[in-house]
Amino acid sequence: MVDLTKEMADLMSALGRPQARSGRALMFVSAFTGEGVSTVAREYARCEAAFAKRPVWLIDADLAQPSQMQAVTEDAARFGPPGTLATASPDGSAFFRLSPPARDAAGQDIPDHKYLVARPFLDNRLWVTRFRIRNLAPGQRPRLNDQSTYWNALRKHAQTIVVDVPSLDRSAAALQLAPQMDGVILVLSEDEGDIQARIDLKNDIEQVGGNLMGIVYNRARSPRSTARRPMGRFAAL
């Protein structure tokens, strides 16, 4: 397991502490798959949780390939044993919607937030979410909401919300969520890759109203998939 404690401590210092009484939401994203966004987001959440007065939430917004809860559960030496599975919504809202809507055997609607669960780690200082993708019906898929009360509701209960989104070569989720975040952190791998694509990502995030707060240069090598050009601003999740 990659240890980015020093790098994340430096990033925490650079970002400063939240100024408002409610928590803030920070989104981590990269231009390409394999640049280590999930690792960086997970390590940042762990380091924040060590000093936070209120819980830190790690939101796995990769609804097609959720993996954060499994990764944290398998690293008990660093995150401790998992707590009891619970709902991940404080007010019954969700940052996504199911299409078509979910219904039970009696034909009654199932609220979207029921498809997002969370477990506590580090003595309840860190909560990690998982989208219940296996519960989807055939042909059903999640779509991100352009606006949602979810983030403000969760800010009341969290010191920091760390949002891990798919890279832009897989999904335009980052561009949909960026305006709803307090800040966006770009993750760049050691490999230089396509510089222009990364510049385009920065510009696109700012153009949709995202607040770019920093860049993390991830020196840890990880397997890279064949690079594709990041999806355009209007591509759907």
Image: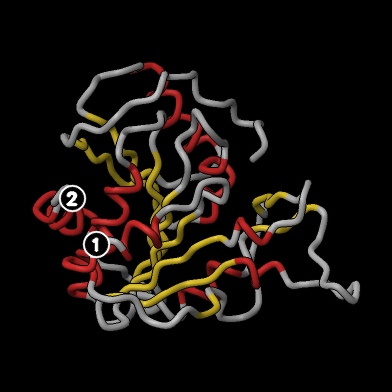
* Above or below, comparing residue 49 to residue 162 in the picture: below
Say which amino acid is labelled 1: Asp
Q: Which amino acid type corresponds to the residue marked 2 in the rendered image?
A: Met
- Residues 215 and 94: in front is 94
Helix, strand or loop at disc 1?
loop
Q: Position of residue 4 (x, y in %)?
A: 15, 50
The quadrant where residue 212 appears: top left
Looking at the image, which residue sits at the far left? 6
Rendered image: mark on residue 65: none
Residue 34 position, x and y percent, is 34, 32
Categorize mark 2 by other alpha carbons within 10 Å: few (<14), some (14-19), many (20+).
few
Which residue in the structure is indicated by mark 2?
A: 1
> Which residue is the site of mark 1?
75
Q: CA distance from mark 2 to mark 1?
A: 8 Å
Residue pictured at 49% horizontal, 19% vertical: 229
Quick one: quadrant of the C terminus?
A: top right
User: At x 13% / y 53%, what residue is drawn?
Assistant: 10
Q: Please state the horizontal and vertical placement of residue 144, each as a whole percent of the image.
A: 65, 51
Closer-to-camera residue (154/39):
39
